[in-house]
Amino acid sequence: EATLDLAERRRIRSAIRELQRQELERDEETLASKRFRPERSSHRQDDKENWPQSRRLEEEQQAALAALSEQLEAITSVEELTKLLRAAGEYEERKLIRAAIRKLRAEEIE
């Protein structure tokens, strides 16, 4: 509805601006609550459908690392360990091999 009264137009524009400002504030609050929402539990929420498979893979990896650790105990040559290190693909494998190399070098120094 059109009005010719300038004071009424100002009040309408002011009301529209106030409504827009309130809407923006609500949107910002919603965004902030989503962005900084605290985690519901201490562990990461996994996809429940894939959880058994990821658990099985993790157990297999732990078993493989344990076997590698036993194998590294038997190796007494830094050169052999270095070859294994270069061939290793996983971070955890490389970590174990580097630890074995450090241990051998410390024993050599003693």
Image (tube, rainbow, N blue to C red):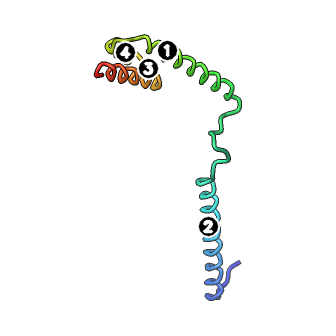
- Separation (CA) of disc 3 from disc 1: 18 Å
Q: Secondary structure at mark 1?
A: helix
- Separation (CA) of disc 2 from disc 3: 50 Å
Judged left or right of residue 21, residue 102 is left
Choose mark 3 or mark 1, whichever is in front.
1
- Lower position in the chain sequence, tag 3 or tag 1: 1
Q: Residues within 10 Å of mark 1 (few under 14, many from 20)?
A: few
Q: Which mark is residue 25?
A: 2
- Lower position in the chain sequence, tag 4 or tag 3: 4
User: Which residue in the rendered view is the most extreme toward the front?
Assistant: 110
Q: Residues within 10 Å of mark 4 (few under 14, many from 20)?
A: some
Q: Which mark is residue 45?
A: none
Q: Mark 1 sits on what residue?
A: 70
Judged left or right of residue 94, residue 48 is right
> Residue drawn 49% across and 14% down?
70
- Separation (CA) of disc 2 from disc 4: 61 Å
| Marks 2 and 1 close (CB-CB < 8 Å) | no
> Residue drawn 38% across and 18% down?
85
- Lower position in the chain sequence, tag 1 or tag 4: 1
- Residue 88, given in percent of the width and then of the height, sits at 42, 18
Choose mark 2 or mark 3, whichever is in front.
3
- Separation (CA) of disc 2 from disc 1: 60 Å
| Marks 2 and 4 close (CB-CB < 8 Å) | no
**Can you tell which quarter of the image residue 2 is in?**
bottom right
**Can you tell which quarter of the image residue 103 is in?**
top left
| Marks 4 and 3 close (CB-CB < 8 Å) | no
- Residue 83, given in percent of the width and then of the height, sits at 35, 13
**Residue type, mark 3 in image:** Gly
